Image (tube, rainbow, N blue to C red):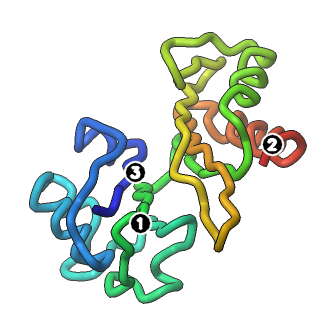
Amino acid sequence: MPKVNLYATFRDLVGQGQVQVEGRTVGEVLQALIQAYPALREELFEGEELAERVSVFLEGRDVRYLNGLATPLAEEATLDLFPPVAGGAFAQRFGALPPWLLERYLLEWGGRKLEEGVYALSGATVRFAEAEPLRVGSLSISQLGVEVEGEEAEAWFQRIQMAAARGGG
């Protein structure tokens, strides 16, 4: 059954960061998600079309550049749903960035651990969790989903991106 990772306001609407939903295409999975969580309909769709402001990724690829809502899904597929990120929320998956390394960076930058995978920085909160590895043939690359929210989110997110590029991802 496909997995759906929900970020920022989508996670808040559903009450959890990941759900499993039946469906053989992106559209079927999103419809099943809306059936289970009706508040998502107006967030995800404009009429019958996926809202432009929403980003839906299948294994790290924007479904708009695949077959859109008709994109077929394997049983073990992972979708990532990102709401609009204007005004203080940024999210991305980083390949090969281990959680321990991100934790080290956050602590070095003065971060304070609030709970597992959640750190407070000056003006921002960082949440991270291991995501489904990216698999290409026999190659498997670990993935770390990172979300930064708050008034200083953009600056901290850029710093995390730079650190990931240098040391982990």
Q: Residue furthest right?
A: 166
Residue type at mark 2 is: Gly
Q: Looking at the image, is 71 positioned above or below residue 108?
A: below
On the image, the x and y values in percent for residue 21 come to: 23, 59
Residue type at mark 1 is: Ala
On the image, the x and y values in percent for residue 11 come to: 33, 42
Q: Looking at the image, is 39 positioned above or below residue 59?
A: above
Work out whether mark 2 precedes mark 3 in sequence or the reverse, and give the earlier one: 3
Q: Residue furthest front?
A: 138
Label 2 or label 1, whichever lies nearer to me, is 1
Q: CA distance from mark 1 to mark 3?
A: 11 Å
Q: Are marks 1 and 3 in contact (CB under 8 Å)?
A: no
Pick whichever, 67 or 9, lies toward us. Answer: 67
Q: CA distance from mark 2 to mark 3?
A: 22 Å
In the figure, is residue 114 to the left or right of 13?
Answer: right
Count neighbours of disc 3 (C-alpha within 10 A) and say few if under 14, some if 14 to 19, many if 20 or more. many
Residue type at mark 3 is: Asn
Which residue is denoted by mark 3 in the rendering? 5
- Res. 168 mark: 2
- Res. 77 mark: 1
* Element class at badge 3: strand
Q: Residue at x 80, y 16 (%)?
A: 108
Q: Residue at x 58, y 17 (%)?
A: 120
Work out whether mark 2 precedes mark 1 in sequence or the reverse, and give the earlier one: 1
